[in-house]
């Protein structure tokens, strides 16, 4: 019989972010789909879709293992062929604890490089959901180390997040052996009553270094900023919150994310991509 008290992430005062990790441990099942518009050089528009299914299980009031699975689709513009693929799964664990009026969380996870797809499906998926870019880099084994801290008071949530993403190429014929990215993010949320909340995210991903090709001079490295992989993305959305039991609740939400420049993906995507996300988390 469990003797610990459950951290009730179903509590209405905690705002769930769109591009950041939750700062609570709970039993969680989550399905969300993001749709992003893109275009080719001829101006043909189409839509890329990506769906993530995630789950976590509360082992104690502080620890919860997590698993995320993804599926992506690239409806290519014009006469180009469509593409569909599975993303790299993510497995890891989150540790949380309260710190006075704050909530602190540390997440350690890794991608499993068994996904399918190519550069076009990867580029379209990263545009739809940049925070899950490691899942779509199917040729890389990526470690995910992140920390979050949130202040929650009277329906208001302010959350900050920092993540380090070292990645090692394990397949494919690319020129880089490994690379390291970092991401910073901020979430602000506020409840209007007990059943509706508004939330906005701002996320910036910075490419740090990339190892030289295997045949390059030893010790040579190139800043990833030269690849155009820095990305700033803003999200804004609304959630509904309904309890379905003493500890269970459903939190469906709809958000719009907008790329604010600084990313160039093989000249395939529109300059400032826009994505719509439908998110359905269930906590229990």
Image: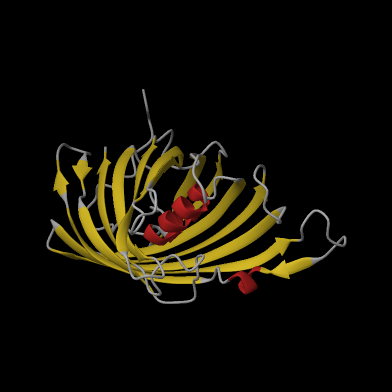
How many numbered badges does the structure rendering display?
A: 0
Q: Position of residue 83 (x, y in %)?
A: 40, 46
How is the model colour-coded? secondary structure
Residue 270 vertical placement versus 1 (above, below): below
Q: Residue furthest bottom?
A: 261
Going 21% across and 58% down the picture, which residue do you hit?
Answer: 254
Q: Position of residue 82 (x, y in %)?
A: 37, 48
Of 1 and 237, the residue lying toward us: 237
Q: The C terminus is located in which quarter?
A: top left
Of 163 and 59, the residue lying toward us: 163
Residue 99 in sight in this render: no
Residue 173 vertical placement versus 268 (above, below): above
Q: Residue furthest right?
A: 218
Q: Position of residue 239 (x, y in %)?
A: 19, 57
Q: Position of residue 105 (x, y in %)?
A: 47, 53
Of 64 and 40, the residue lying toward us: 40
Going 65% across and 45% down the picture, which residue do you hit?
Answer: 172
Question: Is residue 15 shown left or right of residue 81?
Answer: left
Going 37% across and 58% down the picture, which residue do you hit?
Answer: 128
Question: Is residue 97 shown left or right of residue 241?
Answer: right
Residue 232 in sight in this render: yes
Q: Residue furthest top?
A: 1
Of 119 and 89, the residue lying toward us: 119
Going 31% across and 42% down the picture, which residue do you hit?
Answer: 30
């Amino acid at each position: 019989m469990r003797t610990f008290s459950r951290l009730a992430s179903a509590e209405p005062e905690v705002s769930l972010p769109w591009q950041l990790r939750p700062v609570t441990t709970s039993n969680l099942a989550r399905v969300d789909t993001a749709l992003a518009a893109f275009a080719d050089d001829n101006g043909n528009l189409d839509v890329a879709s990506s769906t993530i299914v995630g789950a976590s299980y509360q082992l104690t009031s502080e620890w919860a293992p997590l698993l995320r699975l993804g599926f992506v689709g690239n409806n290519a513009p014009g006469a180009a062929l469509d593409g569909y693929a599975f993303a790299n799964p993510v497995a890891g664990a989150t540790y949380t604890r309260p710190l006075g009026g704050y909530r602190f969380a540390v997440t350690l996870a890794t991608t499993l490089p068994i996904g399918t797809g190519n550069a076009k499906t990867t580029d379209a998926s990263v545009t739809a959901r940049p925070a899950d870019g490691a899942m779509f880099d199917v040729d890389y084994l990526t470690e995910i180390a992140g920390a979050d801290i949130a202040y929650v008071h009277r329906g208001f949530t302010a959350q900050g997040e920092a993540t380090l993403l070292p990645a090692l190429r394990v397949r494919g014929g690319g020129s880089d052996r490994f690379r390291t990215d970092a991401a910073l993010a901020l979430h602000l949320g506020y409840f209007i009553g007990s059943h509706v909340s508004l939330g906005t995210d701002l996320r910036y991903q910075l490419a740090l270094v990339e190892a030289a090709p295997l045949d390059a001079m030893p010790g040579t490295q190139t800043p990833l900023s030269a690849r155009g992989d820095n990305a700033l993305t803003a999200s804004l959305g609304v959630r509904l919150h309904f309890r379905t039991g003493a500890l269970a609740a459903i939190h469906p939400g709809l958000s719009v994310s907008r790329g604010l420049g600084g990313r160039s993906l093989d000249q395939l995507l529109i300059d400032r991509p826009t994505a719509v996300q439908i998110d359905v988390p269930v906590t229990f």
